[in-house]
Image (cartoon, rainbow, N blue to C red):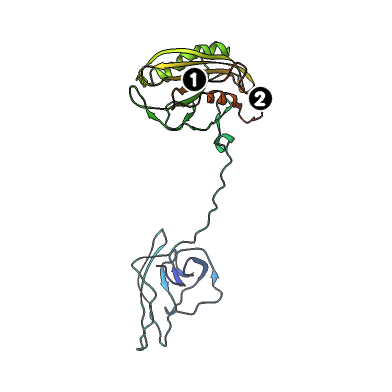
Amino acid sequence: MTPPPGWYRDPSAPHQERWWDGTAWTEHRRAPETTGFGAPLPSQPQPMQHQQPALQRQPVPGRGKAVALTAAAAVLVAAIVTGVFVLGEDDGGPAAQPPPTAATSTAPEPVTATPTPSPTPSEPSADDPAVVEDQLNGITFPLPTGWVLPEYVTEDDVMMTTDGTYDCPGDGGVCRHGLVISRTVTANAESSPKALAQQDIEDAADDAYDRDLIGNKPFGGIESHEEVASGQVAVAGRAGYYVRWRVKTAKGPGGYVQSLVFPSTVGTESPVLVRYVFDAGEDGPPLDDMDRITKGIRPAGDADTGGGVGSGIGPSSRP
């Protein structure tokens, strides 16, 4: 309960009084009445420094003089004012109505509205849910239907995953039906996209379907593999090369892995390696998504740059 409008003693300047308008402090102050009685409010209070109320005083109606007895006053940092008043008449007339009191009355400080800052414009990849950006390699990927941004994934170079997870059929853990990974090729003297893709495909298969990072076999290990496609491909206006394997595992339907390598469009033009991991079977993502994602790779900030799959990639199928 807040004190009603009136003059109150200034807690930081006890020799002055300040006007409280019932909801907030004003900038008006005056010298306190020397008689201690209530007095009519001045029409032009003198403006002074902003403070908080400590003790309530207000005009008391009636025929006689009203004696305001101060019971207690305290000022808290959070602008809490406590005041207890006992008012009465000394001539037997009707008792003056005391102002509302409480054990603790809170006098709120004036609140200054703070405008909500406008969102800072972000990169196109952040605003457009259909685009994912690899800032390190300066490229963007399209995000096909059924694919989402990575969440709770241990590798920091995963660009996207299929939506949802399932229990791995082998050693346990959680698996996903599809992953797309993008990284820069380092510590390799080879620069030919073809040679790099051919070197990487076996590691890509082992990482996806043989053993995980802690040595478990989520799919029971790889039993066999076969190359189902390979060839040159245009990626973001650069000549690249890809190799695709069909992998069969001891448990589960196995899947497809693809290693795609092409020169970067930024910096020293170090080769960029993109790995695709697609589960086989009805629950796996459409194999055509590999080609759609490859065709949609663009240099960051340059959506008009030519890219697209080359003649080396034909219609995809699931052998």
Please tell me which residue is depicted at 44% across the width and 16% down the height of the picture.
247
Q: Report which residue position mark 1 lands on.
A: 318
On the image, the x and y values in percent for residue 52 come to 45, 64
Task: Give the labeled residue for mark 2.
Answer: 306
Amino acid, disc 1 = Arg
Type of the residue with mark 2:
Gly
Callout 1 environment at 10 Å: few (<14), some (14 to 19), or many (20+)? few
Q: In the visual, does 271 lie left or right of 62?
A: right
Q: Secondary structure at mark 1?
A: loop
Q: Is residue 270 visible?
A: no
Q: Position of residue 34 (x, y in %)?
A: 44, 77
Q: Is residue 127 left or right of residue 252?
A: right
169, above or below 196, in the image: below
Q: Nearer the viewer, residue 110 or 37?
A: 110
Let me know if residue 225 appears in the view: yes
Q: Is residue 302 left or right of residue 221?
A: right
Where is residue 310? Give x, y as percent. Answer: 62, 18
Earlier in the chain: of badge 1 and badge 2, it is: 2
Q: Residue at x 47, y 30 (%)?
A: 162
State the residue in front, 232 or 46.
232
Which element carries disc 2, helix, strand or loop?
Answer: loop
| Image quadrant in which you'd find residue 267 | top right
Instruction: Look at the numbered discs 1 and 2 and tell me whether their residues touch, using CB distance below 8 Å.
Output: no
Instruction: State which quadrant residue 297 falls in.
Output: top right
Label number found at residue 206: none
Q: Nearer the viewer, mark 1 or mark 2?
A: 1
- Distance between the alpha carbons at the discs numbered 1 and 2: 28 Å
